[in-house]
Amino acid sequence: MALQITVSGEDSVTFTLDESISEAWVQQRIRRDSAAGRVDLTERLAMCLTASMLQCLDPDLMPPTPAQIIYATDIARELGVSLPFEALRSRGAMSDFIGRYVEVFRARHRSVPHAG
């Protein structure tokens, strides 16, 4: 059995499912015959494909990590600079933002006396 995904009517990817997955998929389709089953399967399939597609992107195109977002937010707040929207969309742009301000941010932290 082959599965084809079309994105924006232009790009399509076709891949072949092995026999055991094809058989399981046929059984899954039989189970989805109820309206509730169809919605559930559609939602699960969408979530799985989205997660899988993210893993296929080049690293700089993937969303930034939670740690990057926290660090960049700290930098932006402390230095009084705007965090660009693009930095919140891709690791590459986030790395560029952090790289642009990290030395100034670190220098401020080295010069601040710590209590204790």
Image: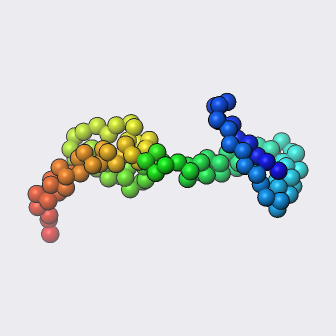
Toward the viewer: 98 or 111?
98
Residue 95 seen in the current view: yes
Q: Residue at image x 86%, y 52%?
A: 26
The image position of residue 61, as x and y in percent, is: 46, 45
Q: Residue at image x 76%, y 52%?
A: 16
The colour scheme used to paint the residues is rainbow
Q: Residue at image x 23%, y 51%?
A: 102
Toward the viewer: 92 or 71?
92
Q: For residue 34, what is the image quadrant?
A: top right
Toward the viewer: 112 or 91?
91
Q: Is 9 above or below relative to 114?
A: above
The image position of residue 36, as x and y in percent, is: 80, 45
Residue 28 seen in the current view: no
Toward the viewer: 106 or 12?
12
In this image, 13 relative to 20: left or right? left
Which residue occupies the extreme bottom position in the image? 116
Quadrant of the snapshot with the C terminus: bottom left
Number of numbered discs present?
0
The image position of residue 85, as x and y in percent, is: 39, 36
Q: Residue at image x 80%, y 44%?
A: 38
The image position of residue 46, as x and y in percent, is: 67, 45
In this image, 79 relative to 10: left or right? left
